[in-house]
Amino acid sequence: MTAQVIDGKAFAASVRARVASAAAAFKQSQGAPIGLTVVLVGNDPASEIYVRLKVEDAREVGINSRDVKLPATASEAEVLDVVRKLNADPTVHGVLVQFPTPKQVRQEAVLDTLSPDKDVDGLTPLSAGRLASGKSNALVSCTPQGCLMMIKSIQPKLEGLNALVIGRSQLVGKPMAQLLLQENCTVTIAHSKTKDLGPLARAADVLVAAVGRAEMVKGDWIKPGAIVIDVGMNRIDLPTGKSKLFGDVAYSEASERAGAITPVPGGVGPMTRACLLRNTVLAAYAQRGMSVPTEL
Ligand SMILES: NC(=O)c1ccc[n+]([C@@H]2O[C@H](COP(=O)([O-])OP(=O)(O)OC[C@H]3O[C@@H](n4cnc5c(N)ncnc54)[C@H](OP(=O)(O)O)[C@@H]3O)[C@@H](O)[C@H]2O)c1
């Protein structure tokens, strides 16, 4: 069997088109655009690139986006003050603080302060609690949300399937498991202390790898016909002096057995970016009591 490749780039383009149409409808109804603000503390070069891309992505779909930059020396109180002002600003519907922040600014303090209604990264404890309690107003972390959309594009009904999530981070593994549980999968969560991962993987109809270890999931771990979602992004230096991005799944081996698989790059990454925009639209619609277009 050669797996169907799930084209994250094409899927993300279709999500962005739907987001753009929902953003335009919001502007027409409310007389003002949806607003997204990204807060960057310090000048880490990678974070600067991520923030620029997020702001540009949002502008392209008609979301009024901007960044707020604070110096690396900003105190926690100063950052929290900015977050509180954004919480209270009715023109801003989505807020995200780019992590990691400098060490004097605790991530926990930022997330405890950020309004869960504007938490477009889905990282606050209240967002996690809403998701775990099955509340419809939960803003869900973008990467697992994108993974679920891709899984459902292959298999719309997941009820009764065995799902294995490898990784239990707040950002990916835990919300991924919650989403699959809501779809009535039988969910197993594996982590660094899990013994004998191979047999667990071989029983999985849906396998999501979110570990950060290049090609850890071997081809013979894959149940024939399974849906395999590879979240891992591992940049490895090659002997040529160049570097290459690898996923957590041994892609060519796994494609021989899987029914469908996401590539790295071009799978989960683009969908993560698109889901941030989707979350911003969901947040804005909820704040104005508008019903969200069903196709979103
Ligand atoms: N494409 C995207 O948009 C996107 C977005 C987010 C993350 N990522 C990538 O996805 C990967 C995971 O990200 P993350 O933020 O979830 O990472 P993380 O916070 O480092 O979590 C990694 C998880 O993997 C588990 N783990 C480590 N070694 C393991 C092993 N040998 N067997 C089984 N489980 C093991 C850890 O277990 P313990 O809990 O026991 O330590 C932990 O739960 C990274 O490569 C990251 O770059 C990609």
Image (cartoon, rainbow, N blue to C red):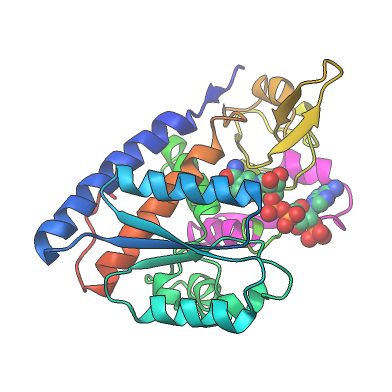
Q: Give the residue at x 47% y 77%.
A: 82
| Most foreground residue, 271 or 100 | 100
Percent position of residue 153, x then y: 42, 38
For residue 242, side relative to residue 207 (left or right) = right
Residue 181 among magenta residues: yes
| Most foreground residue, 52 or 260 | 52
Which quadrant is the N terminus positioned in?
top right
Percent position of residue 109, x then y: 62, 80
Q: Give the residue at x 58% y 61%.
A: 175
280 up-or-down from 267: above or below:
below
| Most foreground residue, 172 or 70 | 70
For residue 190, side relative to residue 147 (left or right) = right
Residue 163 seen in the current view: no
Percent position of residue 281, x then y: 31, 58
Residue 270 among magenta residues: no
40 up-or-down from 106: above or below:
above
For residue 93, which quarter of the picture?
bottom left
Residue 231 seen in the current view: yes
Q: Give the residue at x 49% y 38%.
A: 270
Read off the magenta span. Answer: 174-203
For residue 269, which quarter of the picture?
top right
240 up-or-down from 171: above or below:
above
